[in-house]
Image (spheres, helix red, strand yellow):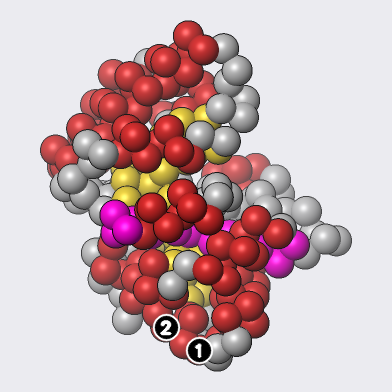
């Protein structure tokens, strides 16, 4: 069984004590043939690009910015850097970007988020790259802004309502199910209801570990999401792995076997 982790944070995983060699060997043993590293701070972009250049068929890169901190960052500089790496064909997506109402309560800052989110939507349209969306507690409002998106859209670690999820798939967006599906009701309901043709799998490592005694998540653990989706849908793990892998290859245009 082959699978892919479509969203992880390798820099943060390494900072929490993991070794790159172990991350890659554990992934290989688990049948995880590729991972998409998703740094959100400009100081980590180059590190991710180096990893991709070192392991071009295993580690891919999506560059993003944390929505809760838009107002504290040099957004124009980050857009310039994302464009620069995209023009060199070094990244497969823009994101995670979007909206965050969980951490941001002030209406003025939320309004600023919408303005900046619009810039990233325009950037993805310009670069013809998929958008990876962070929409914590702001799923419905994210859809309003995404009406301007002209590229593929992935709702990363989505935990919104079934109704919003169904609107997403009506638009052709993909829902990414994290390893937290093993223990979170929201993700379990989504995994049950959303057709497999619109699902992806991710770890969001080092966060959302599916193993209670191991707080640090890693790409190898994406198989927990695959297994849980299979169980919830009462279909084989092989079918879930194959379809979610093909979905990822199509969206992100990944050259992997």
Which of 73 and 176 lies nearest the eye of the viewer? 176
Check disc 2 and report the residue beneath it.
242
Q: Is residue 78 above or below residue 90?
A: above
Which of 53 and 12 lies nearest the eye of the viewer? 12
Q: Secondary structure at mark 2?
A: helix
Q: Residue 212, image x and y in percent?
A: 83, 60
Distance from the alpha carbon under mark 1 to that under mark 2: 6 Å
Circle 2 Cα neighbour tier, 10 Å, few/some/many (<14 / 14–19 / ≥20): some
Q: Residue 175, image x and y in percent?
A: 45, 58
Q: Is residue 25 above or below residue 115?
A: below
Which of 254 and 146 lies nearest the eye of the viewer? 146
The mark tally for this picture is: 2
Check disc 1 and report the residue beneath it.
238
Q: Secondary structure at mark 1?
A: helix
The residue at the far top in this view is: 108
Q: Is residue 138 above or below residue 204?
A: above
- Which residue is rendered at x = 62% and y = 59% of the image? 187
Circle 1 Cα neighbour tier, 10 Å, few/some/many (<14 / 14–19 / ≥20): some
Q: Do we see residue 7 in this rendering?
A: no
- Which residue is rendered at x = 48% and y = 76% of the image? 3
Quarter holding the C terminus?
bottom left
- Which residue is rendered at x = 71% and y = 58% of the image? 184
Q: Which residues are magenta?
A: 170-183
Q: Residue 255, image x and y in percent?
A: 26, 71
Q: Is 8 positioned to the left or the right of 189 in the image?
A: left
Q: Do we see residue 225 in this rendering?
A: yes
User: Is residue 248 found inside the magenta-colored segment of the image?
Assistant: no
Quarter of the image holding residue 223? bottom right
User: Contact (CB < 8 A) between labels 1 and 2?
Assistant: yes
Q: Residue 88, image x and y in percent?
A: 18, 45
User: Is residue 172 found inside the magenta-colored segment of the image?
Assistant: yes
């Amino acid at each position: 069984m082959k699978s892919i982790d479509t969203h992880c944070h390798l820099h943060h995983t390494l900072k929490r004590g993991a070794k790159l060699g172990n991350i890659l060997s554990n992934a290989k043993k688990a049948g995880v043939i590729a991972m998409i590293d998703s740094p959100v701070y400009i100081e980590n972009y180059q590190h991710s690009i180096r990893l991709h250049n070192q392991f071009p068929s295993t580690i891919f890169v999506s560059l993003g910015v944390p929505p809760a901190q838009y107002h504290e960052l040099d957004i124009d500089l980050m857009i310039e850097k994302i464009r620069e790496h995209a023009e060199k064909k070094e990244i497969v997506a823009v994101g995670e970007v979007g909206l965050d109402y969980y951490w941001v309560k002030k209406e003025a800052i939320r309004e600023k988020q919408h303005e900046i989110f619009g810039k990233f939507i325009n950037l993805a349209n310009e670069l013809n790259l998929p958008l990876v969306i962070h929409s914590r507690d702001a799923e419905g409002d994210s859809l309003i802004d995404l009406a301007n998106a002209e590229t593929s859209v992935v709702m990363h670690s989505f935990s919104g309502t079934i109704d919003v999820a169904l609107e997403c798939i009506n638009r052709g967006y993909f829902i990414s199910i994290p390893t937290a599906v093993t223990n979170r009701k929201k993700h379990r309901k989504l995994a049950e209801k959303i057709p497999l043709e619109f699902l992806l799998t991710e770890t969001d490592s080092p966060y959302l570990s599916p193993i209670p005694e191991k707080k640090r998540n890693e790409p190898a653990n994406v198989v927990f999401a695959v297994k849980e989706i299979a169980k919830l849908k009462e279909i084989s793990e092989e079918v879930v792995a194959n379809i979610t892998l093909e979905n990822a290859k199509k969206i992100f245009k990944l050259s992997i076997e």
